[in-house]
Image: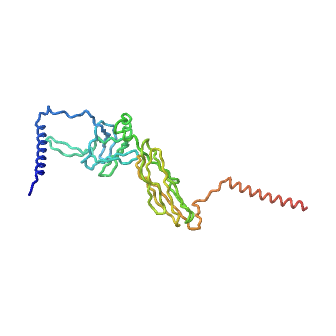
Amino acid sequence: MRISTRNVLAWLFAVSVLTLGAGSAIAQLNADPTTLPLPDFSQPDPDRAVVISVQFNSATDMQLLDVFIANVRARGSLGNPPLLRLELLDEDGLVIREQNEWHPLWTREWDENELESSLVLLSGPGTFYVPFVANLAAVRITDIVSSQVLLTVDVSQPVATYCVGDPASSLCSSAAAQPAYSDLLAPDPLALVAASAGDANPSGQLTISNSGDTDTLLTGVCSYAGDSQISITAGNFSLGQGVSQVATVSCQATAEGSYSGTISCAHDGDNVASPVIHEVSCTVGAIGSVLEPTAPIPVPMMGAYGILLTALGILMAVMRRRFSANVRRR
């Protein structure tokens, strides 16, 4: 086997680098600790934790004691057993993130011989640390084994108070500007009607708006699923704050029948759950037919009264003429 000079040089270089690195690490380990530089703690940790203190009256009965913001990083949840589940919820009840957590009543103790054993307490206090998130509104605590929700804690006030006191915090600025989705479909659900096949295609309008904060962009798409006679155009949107877009929902009146489907609007607004669903239907009558209204058309009272008075007036006029004619004959 031939070994090139280039390969030998590369191998020698790698060995020398590893040797120097190992020697430097060994030298640091053998050095006098008092001569090593101190770690730099001049930059404080910007992360914060929402701390929830509770009292367990039993394994599944708990009450809230306190909620506050701590100037520490939330404890990691990696490797926690599936005993309790903590769900971080926004103001719409949507899950921001979730994590497993130890049950505070599960504890360890040591005897006089320093032997460790596990113990499940009947009652006692518990403390949970969850990451501070600007749009955090509540924390739901669930017992995973029994699938029982033990407590839902409202943390919106402490979070809002912290952001008011430190608006420049990077933890709060993330929620400073968010798009918001709103739409208008009138009527909703939309019912399109064509008197007979071959008539003009009936249509309706869906107005989509960004009602969020200044300098935000709302993006998404409204799509249709259902009978193929119904369709939507201009469903894709990218809207600045205060901007609206009209999507047209139409029905092909080419064949008699009843058609239906749904419009699904997926968006990145933070105010309502995505997607937003609207029901749509279309009725096309037979050729030459007249569709009966679904409800009787009410007649205004004044109109009916006017018709009655007119008829009485005509009748009285005819009777007067006949009476006058009879008088002349006599």
Tell me which residue sits at (31%, 39%) in the image: 49
Query: On the rendered structure, is 163 left or right of 250?
Result: left
Which residue is most to the bottom?
Answer: 287
Image quadrant containing the N terminus: bottom left
Which residue is most to the front?
Answer: 5
Determine the image quadrant of residue 56. Answer: top left
Residue 30: x %, y % from top left: 10, 37
State how the image is colored: rainbow
Residue 52: x %, y % from top left: 32, 40
Which residue is most to the right?
Answer: 330
Residue 129: x %, y % from top left: 29, 41
- Front one among 61 and 311: 311
Query: On the rendered structure, is 79 left or right of 330?
Result: left
Determine the image quadrant of residue 108. Answer: top left
Which residue is most to the left?
Answer: 1
- Front one among 250 and 126: 250
- Front one among 80 and 247: 247
Residue 167: x %, y % from top left: 37, 35
Image quadrant containing the C terminus: bottom right
Number of numbered tags placed on the structure image: 0
Residue 150 visible in rendering: no
- Front one among 120 and 47: 47
Query: On the rendered structure, is 234 left or right of 310?
Result: left
Tell me which residue sits at (65%, 56%) in the image: 299
Residue 13 visible in rendering: yes
